[in-house]
Image (tube, helix red, strand yellow):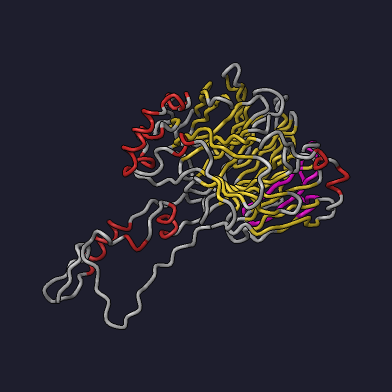
Amino acid sequence: MKIEWDFLKVPDSGRITYSGFKSSMKRRLAARAAVASSPIVTRWQQLHARGRSPARLGASAGPQRGRAPGETPVTPQVPKKLSVTKTVVTLPSSHAALGLEGSSNMRAGMEKKQICSSQLPVLQEVGYSIAENGDMKVCENTSCIWKGCQEGTHSDFRAVTTMKPSILWEPEARLHISGLRNDYYLNILDWSLENLVAVAVGPAAHIWKGGALQTIERIYLNSNSKYISSLAWIKEGTCLAIGTSDGEVQLWDIETKKRLRNMFGHLSVVGALSWNHHILSSGSRLGSIHHHDVRVAQHHVGTLRHNKKSICSLKWSLTDQLLASGSSDGILNIWPGDPGVKLQLQPLKTIPHSSAVKAMNWCPWQSKVLATGGGMKDRILRVWDINCEKIIQSAATDSQVCSLLWLPQTSELMTGQGLPGNQMKIWKYPMLINSSELYGHKGRVLHIALNPDQNRLFSVAADGIACLWKCCEPGQSKHSSKAFSSDYLSSFL
């Protein structure tokens, strides 16, 4: 019996022609390439991220080959989805889940929307376009025209808890972003103390009011050939620092909607920025860190040069005494807070990791405690006592740690993860017990930011989805204030 598949040309001789095989496989297996500076994503990972199995590639190509007697069936090797054996809680925000089940549930969802239209948020009526090669809009659920919603590639946003949660997380709104750079080494999200959210998409930065996601400003670079690679709000005021792909650092005043100045000096992508009052520190892909005094004309007042690889994270401590820098070659450096030194070649401390140090943040209530998350080869969350270079606690996260922040209200840590889960994990501090996980993104959660009131969180993932989460405290219970006392935390050091 002769079996023919439409993607393999089988001549009468029964032999497969190479040209037919090659052209067909190129057409069927072509996948969008990853950003050059990002970790390479294999084809099976791309298919898994889209909710498809590699076994389905030839499903529509014709009859399947019969199995010979005694032949063992082959099971496709796909990564297992992370699961938790305890309680699974689906959040009550039904409007955030509508439109995510695919076209098969579209009609039922539309009927439900007509019945419960009074319960839908005002945000659903909002839509606005940005950038030349993409757009960004608030998801309109069942009537959403975004391709991802129509194809049903997204599951419900939900929380999975392994113990009684200290706070309840609820997705308030979703935004679709096209043109977002899937680059692990960039820092393109920040939430200011003035409650302004900034996100960079290509050559544009978009500013919203944090509570209502109301657009108030768009900042465009002069040249279309470069993109924004980092963002950072000044601690006091509405000044936004922007790092670009060609080594430029710009300052913008959002109130006056004017660019204040351009600062040059880097020769490559500026992937990280951090403020220390009037001193702005910037790190480039060539490994150098520059200090800029934004008050004076000769802004370049200091240089730190120790890394040979890309600087992918920079954080000044809350006391402004120490600067932590992470690089793509797995080096965590701690620098003294003396920007007046013209050139420093030796940091105070150097702590090696087995993978890139991009996810990094200082503890808000203890000045010498720093948390780091490992990259693809490491995957470990660590909390450090910088004074003695000792690990207070560590935990395996089972995936790439892409982003990290502290939750001061509950004395917890949150990490944004990569494949296979692409979830956000919440860790009880200081024991680093994984208390709950937030699912919904289909791409790695590259950026997360917390609002000034610490009751909302903004997440941006590589799948082009941004989500605004509202954290609600269950009942009237508050987290014990002793978690913030120095005596309590010092007992774990």
Residue 453 place in picture, x, y as percent: 68, 29
Q: Residue at x 61, y 18 (%)?
A: 255
Residue 475 place in picture, x, y as percent: 67, 35
Image-based side of 408 in relation to 178, left or right: right
Q: Kindly indicate the quadrant of the structure image that contains residue 350.
A: bottom right
Residues 164 and 388: in front is: 164
Residue 425 in view of the camera: yes
**Residue sitting at the far right:** 487
Question: Is 325 a magenta residue?
Answer: yes
Question: Is 321 a magenta residue?
Answer: no
In the displayed structure, 356 sits above or below 251; it is below
In the displayed structure, 448 sits above or below 306; it is above
Give the magenta range: 323-350
Q: Residue at x 66, y 39 (%)?
A: 282
**Residue sitting at the far top:** 256
User: Which of the image's four quarters has the N terminus?
Assistant: bottom left
Residues 317 and 296: in front is: 317
Image-based side of 177 in relation to 85, left or right: left
Residues 124 and 304: in front is: 124
Q: Residue at x 43, y 45 (%)?
A: 154
Residue 101 place in picture, x, y as percent: 39, 44
